[in-house]
Amino acid sequence: MSKNIKKILVTGATGQIGSELTIELRRKYSKDHVVAAGHRKEPGKKLLETGPYESFDVADRESLHKVIGKHGIDTVYHLAAVLSATGEENPQLAWHVNMDGLYNVLEVARENHLTSVFWPSSIAVFGPEAPRVNTPQNTVLIPTTMYGITKVAGELLCNYYFARFGLDVRSVRYPGIISAETLPGGGTTDYAVEIFYEAIKHKRYTCFVREDTVLPMMYMPDCIKASISLMEADATKIKCRTSYNVGAISFSAGELASEIRRYIPEFQCDYKPDFRQKIADSWPMSIDDSIAREEWDWKPTYDLASMTRDMIEKLRARFAAEGPG
Ligand code: AKB
């Protein structure tokens, strides 16, 4: 455990990333020092049994303020957000949750002199005008989704709070995250997780993007590593206060299906693109993360083969333990 034990609040702790990040932070810093927070979704047993849990809406500043005071929080991982596909179905909700939530976290952090804030941005900050291959850290940011717009505005807000108030806000642009614990909800990259569940359970999947759709992805252990190692890096190394590109793996939906077929040869995947195809087509296919690698030693561990092997092993073990149904 580190010398200065942090008191951490994780918002969005019932979500895909929050549920695993909370457990890892509890393992690393002691379970009583990491408060999980959720709102709409019921917390799982593991989250409730391993440490404190609070239920509140982060868009309600008073509740956030109270929780920060009650637990003596000094660090916030602010993950609560509406993702890209839900954001296109309900842009007003995306703006409200993503912008009011972030603004509240930054304001409460400023007022209470918190030590640091982590907030994830996304590859959704890039739009069709940015180069799609090896997309650079600094390029034109004109996203065409409400989610992407909230992420660009959020990056600028974080940069402002650092420059104007000295708040230590740090951020990475998450690609699609693949994981075996909690399903994602409402994202464009969700197919890359659903495909595993369906391949194992039913040996069939209908993918909502075209077979040749290539997007940047990352396996959960690398996502957790990126988030925590950025937060633990010496402040002098962090030159970017908007958000860092972090790359890991890029593959097409068809390549993922073929990799899964190495373990489930009878797996059949067909493709019926819906409104999410347009979102995917506006995003990068691969990411240039050389600045994160240089400044705070970012390096992913998993490639397509090792991620697929691990996902299949984990899900098979979980489904076997859960039994039929
Ligand atoms: C989404 O698909 O909306 C997210 C993201 C890439 O930020 N997974």
Image (tube, rainbow, N blue to C red):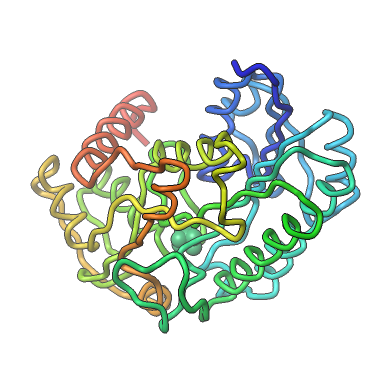
| Above or below, 163 relative to 65 | below
Residue 90: which quarter of the image? bottom right
Whether residue 187 is visible to the viewer of this picture, yes or no, is no
Give how far across and how far down residue 174 sits, in percent.
47, 54
Q: Farthest bottom residue?
A: 129
Whether residue 88 is visible to the viewer of this picture, yes or no, is yes
| Above or below, 287 relative to 113 | below
Q: Can you say which quadrant of the picture contains the C terminus?
A: top left
How many numbered dots are placed on residues in this image? 0
| Above or below, 133 relative to 185 | below
Tell which of 115 and 240 is nearer to you: 240
Tell which of 110 and 292 is nearer to you: 292
Residue at image coords 48%, 68%? 124
Q: Say left or right for 53 vs 281.
A: right
Tell which of 56 and 141 is nearer to you: 141
Give how far across and how far down residue 296 sits, in percent.
47, 42
Residue at image coords 27%, 58%? 250
| Above or below, 154 relative to 238 | below
Give how far across and how far down residue 210 sits, in percent.
25, 72
Q: Say left or right for 86 vs 108.
A: left
Q: Can you say which quadrant of the picture contains the N terminus?
A: top right
Tell which of 90 and 145 is nearer to you: 145
